[in-house]
Image (cartoon, rainbow, N blue to C red):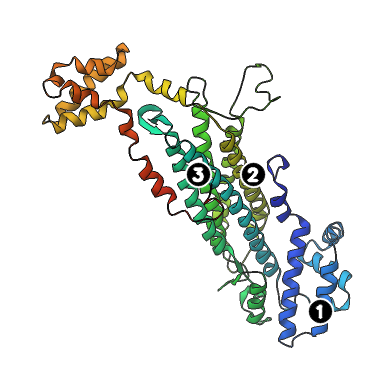
Amino acid sequence: MILRYSRPEMVAIWSPETKFRIWFEIEAHACDALADLGMIPEQSARVIWEKGSAAKFDVKRIDEIETITKHDVIAFLTYLAELIGSDARFIHQGMTSSDILDTTFNVQLMRASDILLDSLDGLLSILKKRAYEHKDTITIGRSHGIHAEPTTFGTKLAYAYTEFSRSRTRLENARSEIATCAISGAVGTFANIDPRVEEHVARAMGMQPEPVSTQIIPRDRHAMFFATLGVLASSIERLALEIRHLQRTEVLEVEEDFTPGQKGSSAMPHKRNPVFAENLTGLARMVRSYTIPAMENVVLWHERDISHSSVERYIGPDATITLDFALVRLKNVIEKLLIYPDNMMKNMDKLHGLIYSQRVLLALTQAGVSRENAYHIVQRNAMSAWKQGKDFLEIILSDQDIRQTLSEEAIREKFDLKYHTKYVDTIFRRVFSKDSRKSHANA
């Protein structure tokens, strides 16, 4: 985790203080259940809650104990004994370290998911707003980086909106799948702890009991969670890369906001670089890189080993913190993005009307010319316009093979720019009509 790419709300979830607080809550809820079952004194459960809830856990002291125990959970339990006194002997009855560690990790991922969902809603809101703002801003669509046919800039943003909407659904599902609790003891058999304790802790923590924990919660759940984050990161990079391409000097259809006092280059004062979009590309690479170790964590020995543990100490904080930062940064980039419609039209005119070639092709086929011959005729004229830099319409109008089939009026009609945007409203209805999320429904 790097503070440069972090927001405090997400960082706090992964702090030692938060971790130890969750550890205590799990242990205390388990004591409540044990007391209800008559297995420990109710007074002891109350004392545990009272003393633990009032305490500010001393991370330095816990770390100090761990230097001796070489075991983090035992160090924490030893600290609780110092803090609570004799009633602490009823803590961790029949439980194993994985019960605490795995349940806590899932609680942290759930809380991280809630922040990510909120950040994603902020991005969706601004994408919707700017999509409508530029619904009719005509620009050239490109395939292979080459001019293809006209679209609108709003349609580009609507596409991004639907992509991030799908990721939101996936993230909701991933959060649901990760929201499981394991309080099942050694090798997950409940031999020394009643399953009702697990059920109580799960309810108290807003989770579901893990059906079969084998001492650890199965890591296929986590693999899917981090894979979902990886897909979302790819969507971030896709939009960031579009901005980077469109900001190139020879294109300059959009541009990141350049604030007063900002510097683009230590050597060249004129530079205005897409630094945030480039940064988002790098951050997305990092988030995606965590999916592979998450997949490999699925494969563990027998009922458990700890080869996954060190991996998750990295990828849990780093993936969620980095992705959250990236979502908020992308939202700010889109919100302040400078958009240049005049440059879009200038760029579209660079091919002198070649973008209408398909309409001429279709008109010829509809008039009775075979597709093969029609394609040959249109391509011949298109290549001539391309090489000579001449107006495609004028070349078409002078081609006798075309004129004997199509009138001048019919040909000119095929060069109507509005034809290509006549279904933009249909696209927007498909994208936004079913959108009912309160966070961005009124954007």
* In the rendered image, the vertical position of residue 104 relative to residue 399, given as above or below: below
Q: Secondary structure at mark 2?
A: helix
- The residue that label 1 is drawn on is 46
Q: Of the numbered discs in the image, which one, if any, rests on residue 325?
A: 2
Of residues 381 and 214, the one drawn nearer to the viewer in this rendering = 381
What residue is rendered at 14% in x and 20% in y? Answer: 403
Q: Amino acid at mark 1?
A: Arg
Q: Which mark is residue 231?
A: none
- Mark closer to the chain start, 2 or 3: 3
Answer with left or right where residue 356 lies relative to residue 405: right
Point out residue 52 in the picture as x, y percentages from the top left corner: 83, 70
Residue with the mark numbered 3: 128
- Secondary structure under badge 3? helix
Looking at the image, is mark 3 or mark 1 earlier in the sequence? Answer: 1
Disc 2 from disc 1: Cα separation: 40 Å
Figure quadrant of residue 415: top left
- Residue 322: image location, x then y, percent: 64, 45
Q: Residues within 10 Å of mark 1 (few under 14, many from 20)?
A: some
